[in-house]
Structures are given as C-alpha cells and as structure tokens.
Amino acid sequence: MCAKPNPLTRLALVRVNEQVFAVHTAQGEHVGNLKRVGALWKFKAVGYDDGGAVMPGHGPLTDQHNMAFATWDEAHICAQLAQLPNVSSESESLDAINPSRVKINPPGR
C-alpha cells in the first residue's frame, strides 16, 4: 500500500514489467497504469464501460490522466494520484514538472 493515501482512495502499485506499473484501488479496481515514457513516469487513467470494455483516459482518476513524475517515489506518486477534485488532503503534492530538467530514477536501479 502506498504511504499517505487520500482517505477516500488507497492505491497500490503493481509491477507489470520494468516500464509499467498497474494502479489499483484497495478494492482491487484497476484505475490506470504508470508507464515510463522517455525520462518520465506518466499516469494513464483507465475506466471500463458497462460491458467491461477498456476506456483509456476514463475512470475515477481521469483528472490525473497524463500526470507525469520525474522520479520514482511511490509515496509521492500515490499521494498525487489519490487527490480527487474538491477533496482536501494532507498528502504532499508534487510541483508541475518541467520535462527539460527531469532526471529519472527507475525502480531496481
């Protein structure tokens, strides 16, 4: 479980491979993926329609779709993703990332 999650949404990051982590709620709902894109980790929101078909860019974390992270810090990533619109959180927030000055520290290195 990620550190300091929003009380409404506890998130778990599950390694798929070195370049992708699935993001799940505490209830096991798949809500997106973190993908390494160049020097950044980008969040890709995922939702599902009534028939179970995948809807990229949708779901409960659609407002965080394409959010980018410069370094792999699971606590910061979870805190940022768990912030929901109009919900106050004590979690730390990441500043906007300037891709021109980003250095990545991927897991396992």
Image: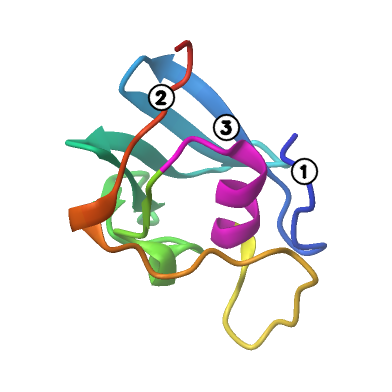
Say which of marks 1 and 3 sits in front. Answer: 1
Q: CA distance from mark 1 to mark 2?
A: 18 Å
Residue drawn at (60%, 74%), measured in percent from left and top?
84
3D distance between C-alphas at marks 1 and 3:
11 Å
Magenta stretch containing residue 50, yes or no?
A: no
Q: Position of residue 56 (x, y in %)?
A: 25, 52
Say which of 16 and 69 sits in front.
Answer: 69
Classify mark 1: helix, strand or loop: loop
**Mark 3 highlights which residue?**
13
Kind of residue at badge 3: Leu
1 and 3 marks in contact (CB < 8 Å): no
Residue 95: give x, y in percent of width and height.
48, 69
Asked whether 108 or 54 is in front, the reply is: 108
Identity of the amino acid at label 2? Pro
Whole-percent x and y of residue 80?
Answer: 57, 60
Quadrant of residue 92 within the rendered picture: bottom right
Residue 44 against residue 93 in the figure, above or below: above
Decide: marks 1, 2 in contact (CB < 8 A)? no
Please identify the quadrant where the C terminus is shown: top left
Disc 1 designates what residue?
A: 3
> In the image, is 57 to the left or to the right of 34?
left
Between discs 1 and 3, the one toward the N terminus? 1
- Quarter of the rendering containing residue 34: top left
State the SS at label 2.
Answer: loop
What segment carries the magenta color? Answer: 71-81
Which numbered disc, 1 or 2, marks the residue that appears first in the sequence?
1
Residue at image mark 2: 106
Neighbour tally class for label 2: few under 14, some 14-19, many 20 plus, Cα within 10 Å: some
Mark 1 is on which residue type? Ala
